[in-house]
Amino acid sequence: MKQIPENYSPANDALRDRIILVTGAGDGIGAQAARTFAGHGATVILVGRTQAKLEAVYDAITAAGDPKPAIFVMDFSKAQGDNYQNLHDAMEQEFGRLDGLLHNASILGARSPIEHHDIKIWLETIHVNLNAPFILTQALLPLLHKSKDPSIVFTSSGVGRKGRAFWGAYGVSKFGTEGLMETLADECSDIRVNCINPGATRTAMRKAAYPGEDPTTLKTPAEIMPPYLYLIGPDSRGVTGQSYDCQ
Ligand SMILES: NC(=O)c1ccc[n+]([C@@H]2O[C@H](COP(=O)([O-])OP(=O)(O)OC[C@H]3O[C@@H](n4cnc5c(N)ncnc54)[C@H](OP(=O)(O)O)[C@@H]3O)[C@@H](O)[C@H]2O)c1
């Protein structure tokens, strides 16, 4: 697995004039990534299922004096073709292109052995974590092709690279994510496409997976932002089809 150059620290305006969409932007790593990208000059499209959380991130970005973001409420467990098309159309009308796409939204699903895995939860987990990023990517590729320096970043996990007991549909969805990334990277010569694995990070999802763990022993989302900045921004030009670890 790859890691970014040590002590990577991009300029404060490294993402100036870039239009970057972040899914799951209302909480955890996605909320931090949205704020960090905006803090480096990007106009961020905040996509997620809980409007109030997206509005809180919007308020934090504008309060910091960073470029005004946009909000698009979308629940990937329910979204249909029309919803993806509407997002594309709204983006096309407002911006005419897309420079960065961070697929970050995911659900944990059930921690369960395959033998007893609830089928409904399996299907929903694969849908939100793998099918939705595929459909969203397909809908937005026309806008990414219009960018001068487009980058797509998928979010993976350690359990998506080496199978681990009881990680069920979540782990399998992340294996699929790695495959989707590699396939798309091989198909696209004008867009770089990579995966990022945040590693253990202090968020609600981690708490749900490891309820007994002391969260203060974990990195915060803010501490793992350099690889996100590297992969979404201009310094990763030429890097594609790769899987990166944040930690
Ligand atoms: N934290 C870790 O230790 C860790 C480790 C490895 C990989 N990851 C990966 O990193 C990414 C971010 O994880 P996190 O820890 O920040 O998780 P999190 O705190 O649970 O945040 C997940 C975000 O995804 C959104 N989301 C979930 N289901 C959605 C749906 N159906 N439609 C739209 N948005 C939806 C959530 O929205 P709401 O806030 O509205 O629920 C939330 O904003 C995920 O891809 C995860 O698999 C995390």
Image (spheres, rainbow, N blue to C red):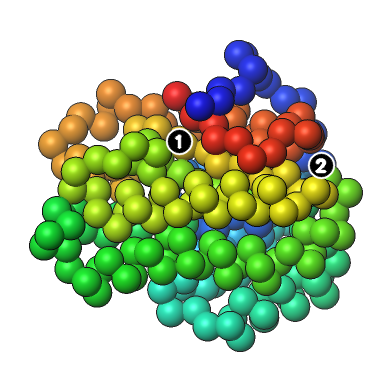
The C terminus appears in which quarter of the rendering?
top left
Residue displayed at 61% across by 52% down: 183
Distance, label 2 to label 1, CA atoms, is 24 Å
Residue 16 appears in the picture as rendered: yes
What residue appears at the point 11 percent right and 62 percent down from the top-left corner? 116
Q: Residue at x 42, y 65 (%)?
A: 128
Q: Secondary structure at mark 2?
A: loop
All told, the count of numbered labels is 2
Q: Is residue 122 above or below residue 39?
A: below
Residue 63 shows in this picture: no
Q: Residues within 10 Å of mark 2 (few under 14, many from 20)?
A: some
Residue placed at 67% from the left, 81% from the top?
A: 86
> Which labelled disc corresponds to residue 162?
none
Question: Of the residues under marks 2 and 1, which one precedes in the sequence?
Answer: 2
Q: Which residue is mark 1?
A: 198
Label 2 close to label 1 by CB (< 8 Å) = no
In the depicted structure, whether residue 241 falls above or below residue 59: above
**Residue ID for mark 2:** 16
Neighbourhood count class around disc 1 (C-alpha, 10 Å): few under 14, some 14–19, many 20 upward: many
Q: Is residue 146 left or right of residue 103?
A: right
Q: In the rendering, at what x and y percent does residue 160 appear?
A: 38, 43
Residue 48: % across, % down: 50, 64
Q: Position of residue 22 (x, y in %)?
A: 59, 54
Q: Position of residue 103 (x, y in %)?
A: 55, 54
Q: Secondary structure at mark 1?
A: loop
Label 2 amino acid? Arg
**Does the beta carbon at disc 1 come under 8 Å from ligand 1?**
yes
